[in-house]
Image (tube, rainbow, N blue to C red):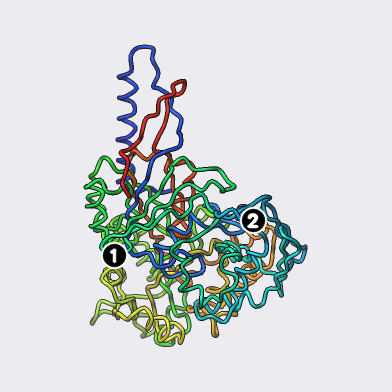
Amino acid sequence: MKKLRWQLIIILVTGLIVGVLLMIQQPDGQAAPSIEPTKGGTYTEGIVGSIKRLNPLLDSYNATDRDIDRLIFNGLIRFDARGLPQADLAESWGMSKDGTVYNFSLKPKLVWQDGQPVTTDDVVFTIDLLRSSSALVPADLNAFWKDVVVKRLDASTIQFRLPEAFAPFMDYLSFGVLPKHLLGSMTLDQIVDAPFNLKPVGTGPYKFDHLVVENNQIAGVALTLSDTYYGKKPFIQQIVFRTYPDSQTIYQAYQHEEIQGIGQVTPDILPQVLANPNLALYTGRQPDLTLVLFNLNNPDAAFLQDAQVRQALYLGLNRQRIVDKVLHGQAILANGPLFPDTWAYADGLEPVVYDSAAALQMLKDDGYAFPAEGDHVLVKDDQKLSLQLIYPESDQYQAEAESIQNDWQALGLKVDLEAVSYDQLISDRLDSHQYQVALVDLNLARTPDPDPYPFWDQAQITGGQNYTQWDNRAASEYIEQARITADIAERTLYYRNFQVIFMRDLPALPLFYPVYTYAVDRQVQSVQMGPLFETSDRFANIQDWFLVSVQKGQASATPGTKPTNP
């Protein structure tokens, strides 16, 4: 992260001071003891929600299930924090020059947690479920897989044939593979009620051990190390997830030593967590972008077609105040339409820094002026700078919209606000282009490839998601070429050029990227968290976490935490 919250800086500085003091207190000539992690211990984490079905094809709408499935199941590939594909079940892959044929080879000697071999039959079976007629599969995902020819070449090699080149294809290969030998006789609709979903068998570093049941209700699940896992084995012997109704209850459970980790630190418990010296906080960018969309073809706000007006509105927007006051510091200022710290992000873009005086001057230079009499609203050619901003109906969005309203009114605009439900905002206003300005979130969870085509290409103006109706041929050419080009260096260049044009033209105003904050007891060591493409990415380096360590040269183990009874 390029910009840390001030609270985290204080924590880091405090930790550095404590570390220096500990070193000073060592006897003369004696260095601090060197430790190395060893296997053992139980880590218990509290998460909000409930456990429904531990099945990667059925967890799309339940973040609790997805977090747990991350440790039990694997896909052909996974993605690192920069959005680049990495080998998972697949050992290697290659593609044809025209980008339409992909061959994947599985790692040798893969086995399920029940000891049965993993083969390409399992991959084909899982894909067949994805392209079944079941309503459980999202329509766009179902349609995508129906257009892909999947061919089993042998037990360890599989081929995918695409109807045309499509560089973001790798996004579609991180799905959790299911065991055909256990589920092959069932349809997806039948699998919904299968016992497998509460006693899953996967290929991951942890396997299902037992459900935690309290008052005849599922209150959690216990996982234990899998002895069949093909990758680096974790140190922590057991991981227990316990479910709670809300974050406050989770924090109370931590205080009562029932858990060692808080699945998500929400704003209501953030002050308490920050004040607790036993908790370490980890913050990562979420796969969301909050932005202001302009309808560039609305005749009632024709001035929005003027790029200089849009640039002035961006310059006169105090985004940092929204982050600090409304979001309690839990966001990073955006500097473009793509996510920072990913392979496609253009680092050299000049950040836009709030300057209301300069913004007002830009508007005056563009011919706007305050009338001698009447409202304090800028006018040009008898047209007032007056607009309506719609936003999703919630307290947070209302506070964000009111902050935007105050900033723009200070520039000399008249800004009316309208709250609508999110469903109505999409279906009734954005899809039909019945709006002037809209405050929205762009959610790109589980799609590490940046592919901005659906939102900004000319072809998506009619019937697509280019809600701004931005009609820029140069930008469209870059993102069209990027999605059919396999070479990552070429794609990076195309996306850099697209971002330069976007930030010059500003069909929308990128506001900020919300962040996800995770808290773990300090006795759990080697925890790290980078940018996220989904919340389960907080477990990306679970193999390095440890609770038990030994001093080098000694045989005795030092537990890092008290044992927890799951």
Q: Secondary structure at mark 1?
A: loop
Left or right: 496, with 532 as reference point: right
CA gap, disc 1 to disc 2?
36 Å
Looking at numbered disc 1 in the image, what kind of residue is underneath it? Asn
Q: Amino acid at mark 2?
A: Pro
* For marks 1 and 2 on the same chain, the one whose residue lies earlier in the sequence: 2
Above-or-below relation of 253 to 393? above
Binning the other alpha carbons within 10 Å of mark 2 as few (below 14), some (14 to 19) or many (20 upward) gives: some
Residue 299 percent across, percent down from the top left: 43, 87
SS category of the residue bearing label 2: loop
Q: Residue at x 62, y 65 (%)?
A: 168
Q: Looking at the image, which is closer to me, 231 or 410?
A: 231
In the displayed structure, 232 sits above or below 79; it is above
Of residues 112 and 273, which is closer to you in this image? 112
Q: Say which quarter of the image contains residue 395.
A: bottom left
Viewer-proximal residue among 270 and 133: 133
Outermost residue toward the right in this view: 97
The mark total stands at 2
User: Going 43% across and 56% down the picture, which residue do you hit?
Assistant: 285
Q: Which residue is mark 1?
A: 216
| Residue occupying the point 29% across, 65% down | 216
Q: Is residue 348 visible?
A: no
Residue to which mark 2 is pinned? 117
